[in-house]
Amino acid sequence: MLLVVATACQPLAADADSGVTLPADSGTADAGEAGDAGTRPSFAHLDAWLKGRVDAGVLNGFAMLVFDDGDRELYRGEAGVCATAGTCPAGRPAYTVDLVTGVASSSKWVTSTVALATLERAVTGGRLASVQAGLDAPVSGVLPCASMAGRSGTVTLRQLLSFTDGLLPEHDCTSDRSTTLEACACAILTASHAVEVASPELGTPRGSAQPPGTVYKYGATHHAVAGAALEKLAGVGFETLFAQLVATPSGLQGRYLNGVNLAGSLRTSVADYAKLVRALYHDGKGSRSKVLLSPATVAEQEAPQAGASVRVLLSPQPGLEYGLNVWRWCYRPVELNDLFTFDAASVVEDPACTAIHQTGHAGKGGFVPFIDRKAKVYGVFAMREDSPGGDADYSAEERDVALRVRLYAAAAAAALSP
């Protein structure tokens, strides 16, 4: 990872191992040293900056864990309270790494992992030739109602998990806890079939269904259709698949509150979610040597899925690439002085990922698990901003804080390398 850490008066010297450019006379930093301008990035500076945001009333609270390549805990920080409606427990409990909250769209990374693990099990059981074949087969092959949904019924798991299926991105059934995944999926496919348009340029993002594979539309319906197809393929319910294939091998204790809303109803903690991130960071190896996914499938999950011809119609993070329910946060080299003066607007996206390549999936309200393979670090950052929008949208403040924290954490980890 090539982060440029500069001061106004010091020359720069390259750290050959980490790829991070540091002040020549900055010395060796560790997690306990100050991170003022003129020194290497440190988790002490990150901690002070985050607690300062809480003290200033910008954030209600935060909690964060960061680990290195050997799973050594580099940073544990927490302060303030959890007070965002819809995601926090009742009241204003202290925000800690063990506090269980709603993680909104960070659920998607988990759901994608369940889907891929289900395909791997089907391959092992002889029901699929390969994971790739499972990703690219129309769901109509396992979901009966899809065969009556016209073009909308031809969508594949790959398109569903990459949001390129063209279906309506929203449907009331995803918030109906009394329904089933299959009933919801069929309702989504039927409704989409009724509003199909002939090309990606026609219709509206929310009110039309474009041809599968031609557009990107972020939403919650994709997972209901994918979940229903997975249940048919495996012959068991999604909750069982989650428990057997992801929760148990990774040690994850979280659970979905709504069995139909697989896109945003997971509740877990920073420490708990970190177990999943740890497994994915280590190419799918979960706790006690249990295998979550194969390295090849983890690589497929993180790979870009939408070609240049795909039109982006709905996205909370426009300009960034998407894998199988994983964001690809790739940027050009960044000049990172310190968190107080860093200009997030100066960060330039780079699809080639030659300098900075992070993956993960943020959730509205401020839950941000991430992996940085270049910097050899992974972690989970959660915050609750003091904003009227709360968990209703991705605010500019939320995006800014999350970006700063992810980039700086990687720089601080690199500074600890010998």
Image (tube, rainbow, N blue to C red):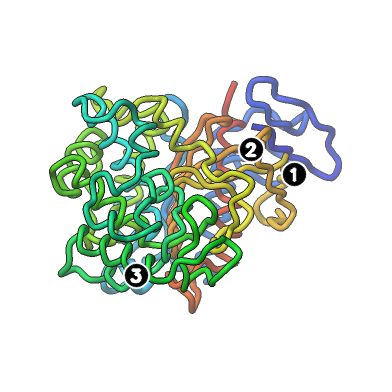
Q: Mark 1 belongs to which amino acid?
A: Glu
* Marker disc for residue 356: 2
Q: Residue 395, percent across and down? A: 55, 68
Q: Earlier in the sequence, mark 2 or mark 1?
A: 1
- Identify the residue at horizontal 59%, vertical 51% (top origin): 310
The answer to whether 347 appears left or right of 58 in the picture is right
Residue denoted by label 3: 191
The answer to whether 335 appears left or right of 114 in the picture is right
Q: Secondary structure at mark 1?
A: strand
Q: Residue 245, percent across and down? A: 22, 36
Compared to residue 110, the image places residue 125 above or below, namely: above
Disc 2 versus disc 1: distance between alpha carbons? 12 Å
Q: Residue 17, percent across and down? A: 64, 20
User: Where, by quadrant of the figure, is residue 138 drawn?
Assistant: top left
* Marker disc for residue 4: none
Cβ atoms under marks 2 and 3 closer than 8 Å: no
Q: Secondary structure at mark 2?
A: strand
Which is closer to the viewer, label 2 or label 1?
2
Query: Which quarter of the figure is the N terminus placed in?
Result: top right
Q: Earlier in the sequence, mark 3 or mark 1?
A: 3
Q: Secondary structure at mark 3?
A: helix
Disc 3 versus disc 1: distance between alpha carbons? 48 Å
